[in-house]
Image (spheres, rainbow, N blue to C red):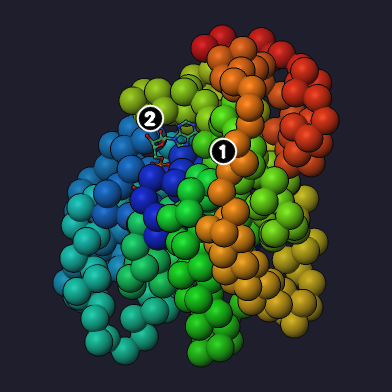
């Protein structure tokens, strides 16, 4: 069983969209998945339109109050075949205070998921946009982290702070996390995005997923329907990108089982590279181009991968193959 936290303290960078759609695509690729909503905003729970008993939520799993406490197995709700959710609601926000100063506060989720480890292939944990007890618990319970970045400097600063926590967990709790960044909401039509993508690729190398999640209006719409994008429009760009991410996650299994010493370097590496990256983009503004940008006429590239895009951008933009996008 693999547990993956989707974390970045920057709000709105695509954590919940990634948690929902990666979970759904892992299921489509034959995996059994539990999505754990660790955010009091409960967007993952709402985004899947889950009906649940509010007396049985992630609050009850995390609370130290004996009279309220429940096991995670008591609160899990089925979403569809092979996909379950541990739902949350606003009550979960009380946990930050309830856990303050409590011994073993960082291990509550880790201990909670133990009874279900044989039940699932993956647990995907959607984190809140802050670094507090909930995020810390999510990271402590996970061996891997996906850090969505929406190509903004705030998002990259989120990486730096999150990676600090990951290193702290390594040093203090001997808990090693394999962390990788995921570019989300990528808009290949803007010069800024293309410039930043090239820089990110240069800087992060293998600490970033090859899959890029392109900006796709369907991903926004499907939240209103309470569905993963693929259940609403299986041809949507967003579905293709998340399916590709799921493949990449599944194939990375071997990497996560490499000796700990190698994995451990990853977090230090990602932190150093983030810091170098932030100073490099701060120092080098987006170059001015004399010709106007063909914003509206640029077709989607067929492949959502770094190497394909970076190569196409630097050679011939006309190389992009148009796709039957129904938007
Ligand atoms: N690839 C994408 N293309 C277009 N819109 C997107 C994409 N990814 C996410 N969005 C939209 O951006 C908004 C923020 O996304 P999301 O809720 O996943 O971010 P988040 O990091 O979970 O936010 P928070 O920090 O508040 O939990 C949502 O309206 C979502 O539908
Ligand atoms: Mg969210």
Query: Is the C-beta of the residue carrying label 1 under 8 Å from the nearest atom of ligand 1?
Result: no
* Dot label at residue 192: 1
The reply, left or right, for residue 200 in relation to residue 190 is right
Q: Position of residue 161 (x, y in %)?
A: 46, 70
The reply, left or right, for residue 32 in relation to residue 29 is left
**In the depicted view, which residue is nearer to us: 249 or 68?**
249
On the image, numbered disc 2 is attached to which residue?
223
Question: Which residue is at a point 75% across and 38% down the rendered structure image?
Answer: 310
Question: Which residue is at a point 69% across and 59% down the rendered structure image?
Answer: 204
Q: Position of residue 217 (x, y in %)?
A: 47, 23
**Number of disc labels:** 2
Question: Which residue is at a point 75% across and 23% down the rendered structure image?
Answer: 317
Q: Can residue 123 be spotted in the picture? A: no
* Sequence order check, earlier mark of 2 and 1: 1
Q: Secondary structure at mark 1?
A: helix
Q: Residues within 10 Å of mark 2 (few under 14, many from 20)?
A: many
Give the answer, above or below, for where 5 lies relative to 177: above
Discs 2/1, front: 1
Q: Secondary structure at mark 2?
A: helix
Query: Is the C-beta of the residue carrying label 2 under 8 Å from the nearest atom of ligand 1?
Result: yes
């Amino acid at each position: 069983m693999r547990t993956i936290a989707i974390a970045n303290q920057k709000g709105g960078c695509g954590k919940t969209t990634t948690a929902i759609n990666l979970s759904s695509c892992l299921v489509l690729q034959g995996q059994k998945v539990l999505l754990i909503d660790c955010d009091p905003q409960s967007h993952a729970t709402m985004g899947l339109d889950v009906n649940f008993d509010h007396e049985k939520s992630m609050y009850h799993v995390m609370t130290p109050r004996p009279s309220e406490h429940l096991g995670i197995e008591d609160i899990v709700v089925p979403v569809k075949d092979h996909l379950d959710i541990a739902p949350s609601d606003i009550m979960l926000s009380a946990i930050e205070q309830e856990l303050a100063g409590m011994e073993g506060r960082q291990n509550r989720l880790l201990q909670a998921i133990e009874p279900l480890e044989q039940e699932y292939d993956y647990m995907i944990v959607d984190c809140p946009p802050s670094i507090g007890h909930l995020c810390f618990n999510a990271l402590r319970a996970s061996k891997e982290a996906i850090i969505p970045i929406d190509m903004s400097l705030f998002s990259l600063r989120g990486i730096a702070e999150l990676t600090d926590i990951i290193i702290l967990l390594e040093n203090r709790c001997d808990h090693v996390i394999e962390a990788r960044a995921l570019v989300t909401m990528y808009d290949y039509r803007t010069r800024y995005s293309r410039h930043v993508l090239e820089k990110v690729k240069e800087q992060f190398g293998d600490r970033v997923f090859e899959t890029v999640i392109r900006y796709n209006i369907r991903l926004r719409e499907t939240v209103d329907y309470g569905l993963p994008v693929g259940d609403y429009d299986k041809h949507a760009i967003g579905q293709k990108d998340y399916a590709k991410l799921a493949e990449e996650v599944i194939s990375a299994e071997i990497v996560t089982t490499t000796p700990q010493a190698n994995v451990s370097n990853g977090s230090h590496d990602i932190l150093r590279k983030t810091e170098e990256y932030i100073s490099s983009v701060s120092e080098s503004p987006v170059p001015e181009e004399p010709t106007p940008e063909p914003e509206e006429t640029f077709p989607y590239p067929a492949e959502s991968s770094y190497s394909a895009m970076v190569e196409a951008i630097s050679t011939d933009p006309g190389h992009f193959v148009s796709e039957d996008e129904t938007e």
